[in-house]
Image (spheres, helix red, strand yellow):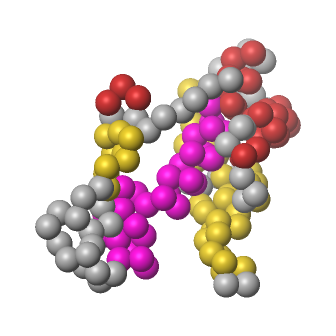
Amino acid sequence: MAEHKITLDWTDAGKPFTYEGYPREHAITFKGGQTVTVSAAPAYRGDGVHADPEDLLVAALASCHMLSFLAICTKKKVTVKSYRDDAIGHLENDGGKLWMTKVILRPKVDCDANAATLEQIHHLAHEACFIANSVKTVVSVELG
């Protein structure tokens, strides 16, 4: 069907290769040449300035939902002026295994649809989101 490739680059930056010393920052280059610096979460000795893999998972879920939502809106002739999502992911310990147990999407949409139509479109977008369909994480949508 489709392949999605990235290039990940990391070096020791001349630092000692010990758990305390090795750098967590690395670069991810996407198609088109866009490069993003990523690090570990601060709890895992990351810098806290850059996005971490957990942030990227939440972002991918929120972005996929939004893109599905916008596509459905165009087909239903609903005009959207803006879309904002303050999404949050929950990393939890389940019997000694850390995993992202749930992600809550909290989209705020400025559009010409009523609340019932918006709820229906968000449901359809959730069903269509292939990132959400690819993970065991519970993804929910809270409409305010």
Q: Residue at x 22, y 64 (%)?
A: 12
Q: Nearer the viewer, residue 12 or 64?
A: 12
- Residue in front for this viewpoint, 10 or 131: 10
- Point out residue 100 in the picture as x, y percentages from the top left corner: 65, 66
**Magenta residues?**
38-67
Q: Work out whether residue 121 or residue 91 is closer to the camera in this orientation and state it.
A: 91
Residue at the far front: name it.
Answer: 17
Q: Is residue 102 above or below residue 9?
A: below
Quadrant in the rendering for residue 65: top right
Residue 15: image x %, image y %? Answer: 17, 72
Q: Residue at x 70, y 67 (%)?
A: 101
Is 66 part of what is drawn in magenta? yes
Residue at the image point whose x is 14% and y is 67% from the top: 14
From the top left corner, tell me how far across and down residue 129 is, in percent.
Answer: 72, 37
Q: Residue furthest left?
A: 14
> Can you give x and y, in whole percent of width and height, for residue 17 in the image?
26, 75
